[in-house]
Structures are given as C-alpha cells and as structure tokens.
Amino acid sequence: MSLDVDVGHRLGDFQLDARFTAPPGLTALFGRSGSGKSTLVNIVAGLIRPQRGRVAVDGQTLVDTDARTFVPAHRRRVGYVFQDGRLFPHFSVRQNLLYGRWFARGATGGASGDFAAVVELLGLAALLDRNPDSLSGGEKQRVAIGRALLARPRLVLMDEPLASLDEARRSEIMPYLERLRDRAGVPILYVSHSVSEVARLATTVVILGEGKVAAVGPVADILPLAEAGDGGSVLDAVVARHDEAFQLSVLTSAAGDLQVPRLAAAVGAPVRAYIRSRDVMLSLQPPQDISALNVLAGTVAAIASNGAQADVRLDCNGATLLARITSKSVDRLGLAPGKPVHAVVKSVSFERT
Amino acid sequence: MTEEEWTAVRLSLLVAVTATAASLPFGIAVAWLLARGRFWGKSLLDTFVHLPLIMPPVVTGYLLLILFGRRGPIGMVLDQAFGIVLSFRWTGAALACAVMGFPLMVRAIRLSIEAVDMKLESAAGTLGAAPLWVFATITLPLCVPGVIAGAILCFAKSMGEFGATITFVSNIPGETQTLPSAIYTLTQVPGGDPAALRLTLISIAISMAALLGSELLARRIGTRRVAT
C-alpha cells in the first residue's frame, strides 16, 4: 500500500511542483498555509486535474497527463476527510456512515468496511440516530472519518481535520486518529501545519514549502528540519516508572532518561516526547545545582546559523535533539561539529502513542 | 352552480395539474443545467426559458398556434406520427400553461440548487457516488423546498393563464374553457355577473389552498429533517 505523487500545477502566481512517495502508515503533509498542501490533496482526491504529472495508489494510476489518464473522483476509492466535516444534513449519522459503503459494495481490498468495527473504533455507537446538526465539532469529525472509512478506500486523505476544533476537542479526537493509523490498515495522507499533531501522529513526514517538497522521511529525522516558528525534535521513549512522591514520571529514551510531570500512561507504555528547540540550553560542563531536571549528553552534529540565532543539532546517542541558542553563545562556547556538550531541557511536551 | 361552471373548474384543475406534472422533470433538468452547467450558449438557454415571462401572452399563444397547430411544423409531425393533436384540445391548454409557468418554475428551482453547498456534492463524489447519484441523493433532496415552490408557482400560473390559452386553443366549453375563460365569457353576457363572482371566489379558494398546501408540505419536510 503506497502512494506515488509527481505533479506540477499552476494556480495564478503559485506553482506547485511536488514529488514524493508515501509508505504505509500515516504520512503528514506539513507546511505553512499557502504552501500547496490542500491543492496537492485535492489533486490526489481527483477534485483538481493537475496540469502535469502522475498519481498512483498501489501501482494503479489515478492520473497521468502523459498517458491522458484521469480516473474521476468517484471511481478512485480515495477517502477524504474535509476540514469542515461536510456531513450530509438531510441524513442521520447512520445514513451518513452508510452512504459510501453502498457504492463500495463488491469492492475488494482497501479498508474493511465492517460497520460494527468502525463504529467501535471511533466510538460512534451513541451517535448513530442523531442528526448531524446536533453533533459537536469533534463528533462531526469522527463521523466524517467513519464515513470515509466505510467507503472502503485504499487511501484516506485528511485535510487539517482538527483545524476547526478547539484544544479540548482536539485532544479528544487524537486517540481515535492513532487507533485508526494503527488498526485500519489503510495509508493516510494527513495535512497539517501543527507540529504537535505531526509529532504525535506521523510515521513519515513530507515538508512542503512554496509548492515544493523540501524534505521527506521518518518523523524523527524530518521534523527537526521543519522551519516552523517553534522548531523542535521528537524523541521516542517508554514510561519506565512513576515517582508518586513528586508527581513525576521517568521516561527512558535513546538519548537518556527524562523526568516529566506525572503522565497518565501505564509503565511500559510508548510515549513520544516533543522538545521545542528554544527549550533546550547547552552547557560544556555537566551542569550542577540547577533547577532543570533533564540533562542529556551528546555531541554537536551540525550548526545552522541564521543571523543572531543558531539552530544546533545534537546527536544524543543516535537520537536527534535541536537547540536554538544565540550565535553569540555558539561563538563563546566554541561550538563546532564533533564537540561534546550537555543539553539542558527546560520543558518537554508529551504526546502519547 | 351550473353543470357548465363545474366543468370549467374541473377542467382548470386537470389542465393545471397536467401542466405542472409534465413540466416538472424538464424544469428540474433545465434548472440544474443553468445552476451547475458550464457550456456554450448557457445565457442563450437562460433567455429562451425566460421569453414567455416577458412576451405578451397573446404572442406566446400565437407562436404556439403557428408551431403546434395542425399545419404547424411540430403539430403536423405530432399528428401524423403519433396522432396527437394539441390545438383546440385541453392538452393544448395544458401545453400553453406549462410554457407560461415554466420560467417561474425554473427560477425557483434554480435558486434552490444554487443554494446547495457544492462541497457536499464533491464529498459525495469522493465516497463513490457518480454525478447522477450525487444529484439524486444529495442535490435533489436538499432543494425539495425550492422544487415545491416552483411547482406551486407553475400551478398557480396555470390556474390563471388566459391570454396564451385562449389564443392557442380558443374558448370551447367542456374542452378548453378554463376558469379564466369562463369568467371572461360570463362577463360578456347580460346577467352573468353572479356566476362570474362565484367562479372568482372558487378561483381564489383554489389558489389559497395550493399555497397553504405547499407551506404545510415544506414545513413537514423541514421537521422531518430536524427529527432524524
């Protein structure tokens, strides 16, 4: 199950030229607004006909401008979860869910289309006889995801499905997306401009900038390269134990142990930690008598200087950590690739996986 | 009420219902073309559909007589190939009413189709629905209030149509004498006023009943949507 994209499309002054392959799992299409993410997704869905290029799912060509092939949207079996849900107002939740399944009868491959399983996966049992107008934003998106899945797609597109939700609704729906990624067996192309969403959900990241693919790869390698305002790095860790006296949890990662505010996760549960680069300080000596609990040892891998600021990429026992410090500090500490340093992590944001 | 007056009422209802029912599928198709279609000559089609609204009804009736009369180009084909004669028959009256009511019907339906969110239609497409299915399961159900409004407008126009009808199919009692023609005839004879007034009241009652009926129907569809 994979998606191959190589397309060019011009919209006014904007030129999209993107080429990437998405492996199984959840591929995040990451970039600022205006970077061409939605255009790209609409091309894959068949809602926009690209001026040049080729899109294929599982080796089956959906569009190929050279061969003059264009499979219309309704024959692509590409599910689409829109930012605004787009539930049919004249159908109940149940009818919305079953809409695509009727057209997919007799189809082979793709998502299973098992109604009971999808209802269970997304927690929709209590909503089935409701009217879409009476649902909350988060519930609407869950129904929209279920509706797309039940059409038995070979690929699911999600165009910022959480963008219209507030923080509480977002964290309510995240676990469903994780289960979907792990259990539905369908590749997902997920558009987002939120680092925390991508850090938590993505298997692979495609960074899009100015209509071009800037980088593609596993989330831990690629996310540090993102030019987001709050750049950061991702560490895969496991909950080692809880320190009930101080309400802390201890995590083990390749880079070393991390102590963080008590997590609601069980011991042994995998966790993904996202560390913003501006929350990391560097020290040449192991720091003593400081309030920060987390100090990770590593060596400088690369320094990208950008005027007064510099992004220092560290190699902490194979894991990548990013620190954003001033160029003056780089100079004062004599930082250079290969130099051993200690990273002081001021705070960690956590994303359960 | 005399037997002749009842005949006029029955005939008017028959003509109006036939005109509305027969033109509704065409009205929906043309409204969809005008609302969603992108083709050469769209504004031409738009103008053509609206012609009966802006032309004098007598002119429309006379054009129908030329085209659909027994020796007209279309009327001759219909007569010889299918044995259908429209001129001076109640079916001709229905045709005249349908033509006169068509622009009103198309306008109402077109506006309601344009009000349907095209994003819902493209969502249905990504779920596997071919364009015709999208229309049948999403667009049409969502614009039912507009379809009802269009049908009622066409029905009301048909109940009141006079100029085109009398020009095309004349004023034959029992065959083409609808309510307006009957009222007109009664006002032309001495002592016909009481009968004309009776028919006028009946005409008003039918129009109001049609309007009320459409309101109730629209409301019922609305509440069903909320209840599900």
Image: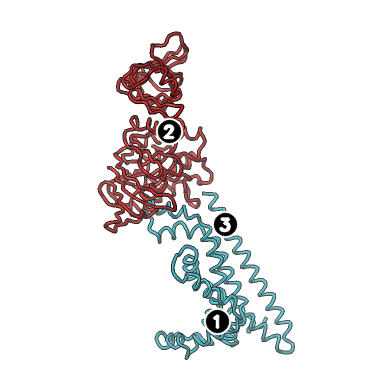
For disc 3, the marked residue is B220
**Chain identity of mark 2:** A
- Side of B181 where A140 appears, left or right: left
Instruction: From the viewer's side, name the closer residue of B33 and A194.
Output: A194
- Tell whether label 3 touches label 2 (CB within 8 Å): no
* Quarter of the rendering containing residue A327: top left
Q: Extreme top residue here?
A: A289
Q: Which mark is residue A195?
A: 2
Residue A296 in the image: state x and y as whole percent: 37, 17
| Position above or below: B137 against A110 | below
Residue A68 lies, in percent from the top left, at 29, 59
Tag 3 subunit: B
Apparent side of residue A52 relative to residue A290 in the rendered image (left or right)? left
In the picture provided, is A154 more to the left or to the right than A173? left
Q: Specify whether disc 2 shares its chain with disc 3.
A: no
- The residue at which mark 1 appears reads as B93
